[in-house]
Image (cartoon, rainbow, N blue to C red):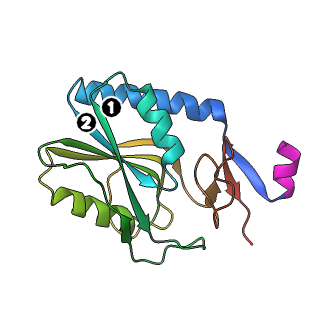
Amino acid sequence: MADALRATGLRELFTPHQISLRVQELAKDIDALYGDETLVAICVLKGAFVFCSDLVRCLRNKNIEVDFVRLFSYGNGSASSGRAVINKDVDIPLNGKHVLIVEDIVDSGRSMRFLLERMAMRDVRSLRLAALIDKHERREVAVHVDFAAFHVDRGFVVGYGLDYAERWRSLPAVYEIAAE
């Protein structure tokens, strides 16, 4: 499979084992911060679903509520449109609760800034951000990632939930896709 992926222009950045270890480490950090307090994990669809699932299963805290939000900013391309839109909002009331946004990648920061501002308006007790990948190459607005599994300087990444035009989400590792 590795040869077939290289032939498609994909280069492995993080193996399934590396990802698993980092998710477990993040879960320990999150557990240390929240203890057994109620926590709402908000998974940003579609890209973060694999990361979020693995992360919440690694948490010792069993007072976790999970909800989903869906944002659009990329469409079918590799560059953000610069404008985020909420297509699906959370269903759980957030007022007075600790909220952890779980995202696949923070790139330009525009979508996350938009989402964090929207969630903060809901009178949450605390608001933090966990991301599989914190990428600064195209960062345009300041966004603090509280829990980052990996830092990537540049490139377009796929796998482990991350996609390019809906392709490669199911790959078990994270790969960099070659420029077209």
Image coords of residue 1 (percent x, y): 85, 43
Residue extent of the magenta highlight:
1-7
> Would you say residue 3 sits in the magenta stretch?
yes
Q: Residue at x 64, y 52 (%)?
A: 169
Quarter of the image with the C terminus is bottom right
The label number, if any, that marks residue 30 in the structure image: 1
In the depicted structure, whether residue 176 falls above or below residue 75: above
Image coords of residue 157 (percent x, y): 62, 56
The label number, if any, that marks residue 39 in the structure image: 2
In the depicted structure, whether residue 57 falls above or below residue 99: above
Image coords of residue 127 (percent x, y): 23, 47
- Could you tell whether 105 is left or right of 97 in the image? right
Provide the secondary structure element on which disc 2 rests. Answer: strand
* Few, some or many residues within 10 Å of mark 1 (<14, 14–19, 20+): many
Q: Quadrant of residue 178?
A: bottom right
Q: Quadrant of residue 8?
A: bottom right
Q: Amino acid at mark 1?
A: Ile
Query: Which label's residue is closer to the chain start, 1 or 2?
Result: 1
Q: CA distance from mark 1 to mark 2?
A: 10 Å
Q: How many marks?
A: 2
Q: Residue at x 55, y 56 (%)?
A: 153
Which of the two marks, 1 or 2, is nearer to us in this view? 2
Q: Residue at x 58, y 35 (%)?
A: 19
> Would you say residue 5 sits in the magenta stretch?
yes
Check if mark 1's residue and mark 2's residue have beta carbons within 8 Å.
Answer: yes
The outermost residue toward the front is 91
- Magenta stretch, overall SS: helix
Provide the secondary structure element on which disc 1 rests. Answer: helix
Q: Amino acid at mark 2?
A: Leu
Residue nearest the observer in this picture, 170 or 21: 170
Image coords of residue 170 (percent x, y): 66, 48
